[in-house]
Amino acid sequence: MGARRFRWVLHVDLDQFLAAVEILRHPELAGLPVIVGGRGDPAERTVVSTASYEARAYGVRSGMPLRVAVRKVPDAVVLPVDHPAYEAVSARVMEALRGMGTVVEVLGWDEAFLGYDGEDPEAFARAAQRAVLDATALRCSVGIGDTKVRAKIATGFGKPAGVYRLTAQNWFEVMGERPTVDLWGVGPRISKRLAALGIDTVAQLAAADGAVLTAELGPRMGAWYGELGRGEGSAVVDDTPWVARGHSRETTYQHNLTTAEQVAAALRELAAQAHADTEAEGRAVVRVGLKVRYAPFVTRTFSRKLPAPTRSLEAVTAAVLDLAAGLEPGREVRLLGVRAEMVMPDDGTDAETTPVRGRI
């Protein structure tokens, strides 16, 4: 169907998706604290992907180290991540939503935007919930908004398994006194930078001087955060297939890497994996990135544009190792990641010989 602007945007979000899929597969887990993460081994360095609501009641959250989560809930059922199972269920969810005859913009395994132009978005939201439930036996929450931002944030007020509408009319009533970190797109780091400017709430961000935001966050992002504080943004829903800009591979090591030789060997392996992903798409690499997490938990990232697009594994590996020369000598490493960014299909360039215009 392509991209269309709609009167209403609906954000559909599956409730506790990974845990819910596991409970469907293992009904005896219903009502128990279930944690999904890594290979299901709390002894390994891995994090929580999803926790059931029963586990969340003890403070378990996505991204939390698995060993910490298990300390919070010693009797939790810990399961490994099963990508193929989740992808299969997700495909059924999206097929059910597309069957409603509207544009469906997929955001991930467990969420999507839908467009709606009718008079009763709540009825349409409930119809979407029934479609998903009938197709998969899973429940979802639906946020209704007049922009994508408001729809996405509204979903949180509808959980679990509810429907909530957030528009220009009730935006400040609902969101005005909330901290900026409650906004979609504002994380702890940005909220701290805003707090340093005396901006603590959504209403304060909405009223902030654009020049102040631009000076602190840059001309593009400063303006964007101001719009975010007002809940403004696009109401265009686009079902155009997503095209990856790049592929990343990273590993958290069970034992810290302590020598430059260990780091180099690990980076060669990660570079080969990321390069294989780009080769599967037949697109040349134009930029490489390196992520390092030193022990105990300090993360740094580096990136570099290549002199010309390349499909050479040797050139990609050499660029990654060159970035690694900037790592702090003597520091133990617990995580490494490599990213390979590619020529985009609409760049109109010859991937083998033509330099890419601008930054990808």
Image (tube, rainbow, N blue to C red):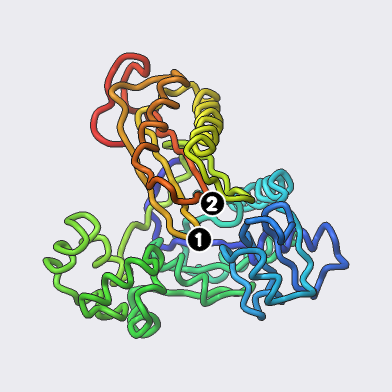
Q: In this view, does 166 lie to the left or right of 141?
A: left
Q: Name the residue under label 2.
A: 334
Residue at 43 percent of width and 48 percent of height = 330
Query: For residue 246, what is the image quadrant?
Result: top left
Q: Name the residue under label 1.
A: 296
10 Å neighbourhood of mark 2: few (<14), some, or many (≥20)?
Answer: many
Query: For residue 327, what is the image quadrant?
Result: top left
Q: Is residue 243 visible?
A: no
Residue at 32 percent of width and 66 percent of height = 190
Q: Residue 244 carries which label?
A: none
Q: In which quarter of the image is the C terminus?
A: top left
Do the numbered discs 1 and 2 sit on residues whose CB atoms are within 8 Å? yes
Residue at 33 percent of width and 74 percent of height = 168
* SS at badge 1: loop
Residue 281 vs residue 263, the one in the foreground: 263
Above or below 167: residue 360: above
Residue at 56 percent of width and 31 percent of height = 269
Q: Can residue 346 be seen in this view?
A: yes
Residue 228 vs residue 330, the one in the foreground: 330
Q: Where is residue 50 in the image (x, y as percent from the top left)?
A: 64, 63
Residue type at mark 1? Pro
Residue 24 vs residue 145, the one in the foreground: 24
Query: For residue 353, what is the image quadrant?
Result: top left
Above or below 332: residue 175: below
Q: Where is residue 179 in the image (x, y as percent from the top left)?
A: 36, 79
Q: Is residue 300 left or right of residue 70?
A: left
User: Alpha-carbon distance for marks 1 and 2?
Assistant: 8 Å
Residue 329 vs residue 289, the one in the foreground: 329
